[in-house]
Image: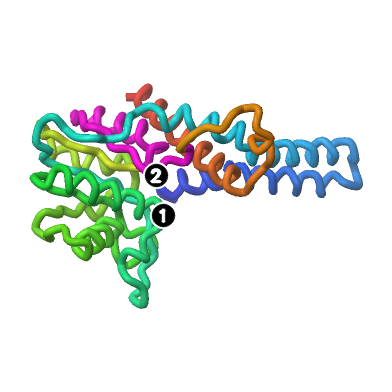
Amino acid sequence: MDLFLLKKVISVVIMPINMVLILLICSLFYFRSRPSTSFKYLMSAFLLLLVSSMPIVSDTLMVTIEDNYEAFTRSSKPVDYIVVLGNTHSSNDALPVTSQLATGSLQRLVETLRIYKIHPEARIITSGFTGHDPVSNAEKMKQSLVLLGIPEQKIITENFPKDTEEEAQLISPRVQGANVVLITNANHMPRSMKYFQLAGVFPVAAPTGYWVKSQHSESSWRNYVPTSRNLEQTTVIWYESLGRVVQWFKILLN
């Protein structure tokens, strides 16, 4: 098993909902032989699910990640490159290419169009490998941008990076010394910026796809009502936090 696949497997196993399932399985396993232990596992699963689904917890944690960089407005000097990091898609010829993009890819696509309209002098670099799809995410984003009016000759594709670290390593030599705007989701931006800085590139951040657009009053009862959306949001927090821990260890070991 290669390192990339191993990272993906570990990240899936320790996600909140899967941890809840593991705790429930443990509870069933000890149900007859050790009822008190079974109950502890059951309560742990319940509490983990409850806390992970509460807006007051999920939103507070997400804000600490998303608020590291301000939204992009305009660069004071010409932009050389707009770098769009990869996300996911599902190829389906029955759908328009823009409808084949996952939510994260669509959010980055819209931000790319917005910034290109402000800085039409820039070239666009799309990134991302194929995964289990016959077409790379970089190519699918390029097709979408061309469909929406961006000249094809203004777009460069990087079809092979599997993760954020590889994106920084492969794109950085091309953009060294240039004025670069980096587009990715707000929760992903701190880790992405760090990888590019380690590669010698210091881009201007253009975060998009914010989970928390405005925080509600802490006294609102809605902040304490579990929702499936907040469970999904906590999963994203968990995944990104794991990525930052891995990044920290890599820096420490190097």
Disc 2 residue type? Gly
**Figure colour scheme:** rainbow
In the picture, the disc for residue 209 is: 2
Q: What residue appears at the point 24 percent right and 55 percent down from the top-left corner?
A: 159
The quarter of the picture where the C terminus appears is: top left
In the picture, the disc for residue 253 is: none
- For mark 1, give the secondary structure: helix
- In magenta, the rendered stretch is 185-212
Task: Answer left or right for 159 relative to 33.
Answer: left
Task: Answer left or right for 9 relative to 104.
Answer: right
| Residue situated in front as seen by the camera: 6 or 19 | 19
Locate residue 83, reporting x and y percent. Answer: 22, 44
| Residue 246 position by quadrant | top left
Q: What residue appears at the point 32 percent right and 35 percent down from the top-left corner?
A: 192
* Contact, mark 2 vs mark 1 (Cβ under 8 Å): yes
In the picture, the disc for residue 103 is: 1
Q: What residue appears at the point 90 percent right and 44 percent down from the top-left corner?
A: 33
- For mark 2, give the secondary structure: loop
Locate residue 144, reporting x and y percent. Answer: 25, 62
